[in-house]
Image: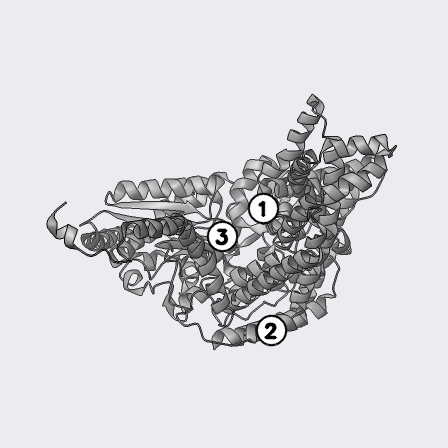
Amino acid sequence: MQFGLQKGNDMIAQLQKVAGAAFVVLLGSTTLGSAQTVEFWHSFGGESGEALNQIIANFEEANPGITIEAQEVGNYNDIVAKLQAAIPANRAPDAVIMEVTRYGLFADRGVLIDLAPYFDADPLKDELYDFAREVGVFEGKTYIVPFNSSTPVLYYNKAIFDRAGIPEDAPLKTYDDLLAVSQQITEELGDEGITGIAAPGQFARWGLIMDNDSDLIDSTSGEILIDAENTIEAYEFMASLVHEHKVASPDGVTRENDGRDAFLAGKVGMMINSTGNYGRSTAALGDDLVVMPMPCNKVCAVPIGGAGIGILSTSEKEVQDAAYKFVSFAASPESNAIWFSATGYMPINKATPQQPIAADALEGKPGIDVAINQLDFARGRPRPPVVTWMRASEYDMWQAMALGQRDVREVLTEFADKTRAEAERLEK
Amino acid sequence: MTAATEARPVTRASHPLRKTRLLRRLTPYLLALPLLGFIAAFTYVPIASSLNLSFREWDFLSPTKPWVGLDNYRLLLDSREFWNAMKVTAIFAVISVPIRLALALLIATRLMSETWVSRLMRGALFLPSVTSTVAIAVVFSWVFSTDYGMMNAILGWFGLGKVYWMQDPQIALWVLIFVNSWKQLGYDIIIYLAGLQAIPTELYDAASVDGGRKFHVFRRVTVPLVMPTTYFLLVISVIEAFQVFTIVDVMTKGGPAGATDMIVNMLYRVGFTLFDIGQGSALAVILFILLIALAVFKSRVLGRKVHYES
């Protein structure tokens, strides 16, 4: 993936802007007749929420007839649960942020509209990177336009590494490397309540499974790989960090954010987490934060995460038009640059890196480009309806394995069987 | 009065006195109607709706809700998760309710005096009852955190090792029982105080004249006469124990590995995170029947022994 300045493409960019403006005017002609309010559900608080509010303010300034009523309704899981309950109650929003693996069920059930009529006519379609465009496609149709894209990365605390006597160039490529460094930190600094690594959260677990040349569900064939040998091996390694080697706190198993919070508080040496945590990690650790690529245990592979914005089929046509204008604006280079520089989520628009604010971030924020550089071996993840069920159920399985309560192979075999049965039920 | 009206015959139905009587009879019902409508809309209709959904397969999103008969009930009764949730909920209720009631009664008897210390203590003990359950659960999550929590820090001062409060299946449920009891104890105490104050002092005077020791007075006078309050608290507490959700959801989400997975937590998980509203509704119906059965059982078995009046 090339993020050069692409100065030679200025003319094309200008033409795209003119075409974009014409498209927006055309779309606007159908909506500006009356003021529209778009209810928009999202999952961003803190610094991310502030960046989103800035994008919304910019949009409303550029589109005086449209008001975006943004509501933070919780994390991705909460959004799924609340949306599910809101739809039969006729209280669904007009636009919603949906995690890239969990919108398939809503697309399948006709809750989200096919954005093709808007997207195909929008120059944005060609401005997006291939990976970003792909995350919105389910069964050949586009249901979400990406807003925040991420891959997991390896964060470490340089001060903890120094105090534990770990050199800066210590290898962090394989499972064994991770274990060795984690053990050294725990041995050297365990008395101070510092542990080697945060128990991996679900996104990190998926990444470590991919690094072991496997997956949970094959993204092309849809085959369930939960009980594949390499998946079992990956879970055995991750679980052993907690219950066997005791280099990861069990607190992060029962409450996944505890591991991240402990890392931010300087109580954990390493953390594998979304690049979307870059902003808060630099705010917490400052110059002590180092960002590294994901390990490559058997292969180099990372999952693409994040979310996109979908539009609800229950909204009025005029509101859908207004909502799409916002969706398109949020993915524009200007908005995406604000978002990228504030949060660390990856640029999704090819023109984003040329925006001054993004260029400054790439220049002055060390490690913010690590996720971008991983895109060469990043993989989209499957999004059939069963993924939502699988991800909701996986937490309990992980707890049983990580806390040493059940055998990893037994758990995953049973879980794979249940997932296959559920997939069959959902397909009926 | 005109001649025409004078001539009109006064029938039984139109008799003014009869109309007044009818209005008087209807008035209470008319006054209750808005409240009955409210209760019907927000209680009875949802109950009927849940009952209907429990015989259907639905994920909130599909336009159709196919009838599946008793399949949802059969699947639940066949599942290990359901029986685990039943067991965990029963243990939670059986352990937490008696401990709470016994502690509350003991503390209430000590707070009967009208000193400033007693008044302060009543207020202090009641505070958790009016504090947000979510806030309490979040705070206790950190108190019982294995590596960063206060409890293990205190144990560490005494040279004791870490306890996996919320990760050990043998311990996690006890933590929830403790937190829930801590929150509810103040309410129980206040209700007991009201019950204790209703006991005639002459009975204590008579017991004192008869030379009764404190423990015997407590056992023979206080406990029997406060039985109506105990019965009321028992009914309320058992229902509350079977419906506990917030503390579980915030602190453990039913984990580790199902060790604290109670019925309402399972209901939420099945219905709202696993998209099976049919099974979720079936679980709600089972819980409803269970609570009714418990209430009837308590009324039949204990109810008669509660009141001393004829």
Q: Do the residues at discs 1 and 2 belong to one chain?
A: no
The quadrant of the rendering that contains the N terminus of chain B is: top left
Chain under label 3? A
Q: Nearer the viewer, residue B218 or A15?
A: B218
Residue at which label 3 appears: A372
SS at circle 2? helix
Q: Give the residue type that dot 3 points to.
A: Ile
Mark 3–mark 1 CB contact (< 8 Å): no
Crowding at dot 3, Cα within 10 Å, few <14 / some 14-19 / many 20+, comes out as many
Residue A7 visible:
no
Residue B222 appears left or right of A21: right
Above or below B301: residue A38: above
Q: Label for residue B10?
A: none
The residue depicted at 42 percent of the width and 53 percent of the height is B36
Q: Earlier in the sequence, mark 3 or mark 1?
A: 1
Residue A291 is tagged as: 1
Tags 1 and 2 touching, CB below 8 Å: no
Q: Nearest the camera: B148 or B37?
A: B37
* Residue at (84, 34) in percent of width and height: B214
Q: Nearer the viewer, mark 1 or mark 2?
A: 2
Q: How many marks?
A: 3
Chain of the residue on which disc 2 is drawn: B
Give A290 or A114, whichever is nearer the viewer.
A114
Residue at which label 2 appears: B75
- Give coordinates of residue A39: x percent, y percent: 35, 50
Q: Position of residue A178 (x, y in %)?
A: 70, 53
Q: CB atoms at circles 2 and 3 under 8 Å apart?
A: no
x and y percentages locating residue B238 in the rendered image: 66, 52
Task: Specify the amino acid type for callout 2.
Answer: Leu
